[in-house]
Amino acid sequence: MTAKIIDGNAVARHVRGEWKKRVDALRTRGIIPGLAVIIVGSNPASRVYVRNKVKACAEVGLHSETHEFPADVDEGTVIRRIDELNRNPEIHGILVQLPLPPQIEARHLLGAISIEKDVDGFHLYNVGGLVVGENNIFPPCTPYGVQCLLEYENIPIEGQNVVVVGASNIVGKPMALMLMAKDATVSICHIKTRDLAQYTILADILIVAAGCPGLITAPMIKRGAVVIDVGINRLPDGRLVGDVDFEGVKKKAAYITPVPGGVGPMTVTMLICNTVAAAERCAAKNAEKNPVPA
Ligand code: NAP
């Protein structure tokens, strides 16, 4: 058996094409979805991620702007900027690029973002919405992208054994909640999990987001499993790899995502989707407040 390699770039292109139609529909009403990205300091990886987000927004016709602060900025200054952006009608989504320097508490900045503009889905309101299965929230972009890949490939989720390796707030935990909401039976593994393989071997769908190259090898997976590799690791020789031994596992899995070219392109795509959805919700609210006279 050789797994079907899920082409994240192709799925991302398709999804962006679909959402571009919604951007065009908003444009006919004079609305251009706008995203503001806040970046503090000069972390090189963060700069690359922000550049990619800005480029992707432009391709789909979104307005985007980057708000840069020096690494030693105080928290109050950034929160004041977030307040301004919350009030700016041309901005529908606000994103704080993580990580932040130590003098700034991420939760303070994330908590300052208006819940209607929290397109990264990290505000506690959106996190709580995921827990209780609220529909009108913004799902965090990486797990939302994984869910979209599974749906695009028509991979059933209901009743499946899903194992998520990694329990971070931005990937592992929301991923588990989103698939639980789709009626999967979900286990979450983390660094203290004893004998990881005893869990992974049971997975119909295995999602790995640990940041450990080579963590998952072929003997650890069930034959015919769906393996989604969220990890992105730079090896000393410069190569970019995931957390899964791709060459070994692809001989045993039914589906596998490559790194790069799997989950990565979907993360940026879902940010666009959330920003467009935010602009649509804002437009609907404004139309309710100011109905067109008959
Ligand atoms: P993180 O905050 O460092 O969390 C990693 C999680 O994995 C933690 O829960 C940790 O356990 C667990 N873990 C670490 N080593 C493990 C091991 N040997 N066995 C089992 N669990 C282990 O990282 P993250 O932000 O979730 O990101 C995870 C990976 O995904 C990284 O490689 C990151 O670059 C990548 N990523 C990719 C995208 C994308 O768009 N493709 C987006 C976001 C992140 P503890 O909680 O117990 O420490």
Image: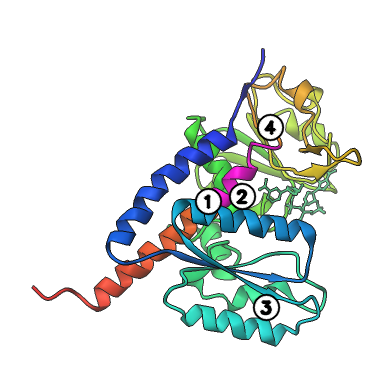
Residue displayed at 80% across by 72% down? 101
Task: Report, in whole angstroms, how far the alpha carbon at label 3 lies from the one at label 1.
Answer: 24 Å
Residue 173 locus on image (x, y percent): 66, 53
Residue 200 locus on image (x, y percent): 74, 32
| First-in-chain label (4 vs 3) | 3
Residue displayed at 58% across by 31% down? 7
Residue count near mark 4 (Cα–Cα under 10 Å), binned few <14, some 14–19, many ≥20? many
Residue 68 locus on image (x, y percent): 68, 73
Q: Which residue is mark 3?
A: 108
| First-in-chain label (2 vs 3) | 3
Task: Report, in whole angstroms, how far the alpha carbon at label 4 lies from the one at label 3.
Answer: 35 Å
Q: Tell me if I can see residue 158 in this picture.
A: no
Q: Is 92 placed left or right of 146 in the picture?
A: left
Q: Secondary structure at mark 3?
A: helix
Q: Tell me if I can see residue 8 in this picture.
A: yes
Q: Secondary structure at mark 1?
A: helix
Give me the disc on residue 258: 4
Amino acid type at image mark 1: Met
Q: Which residue is mark 1?
A: 270
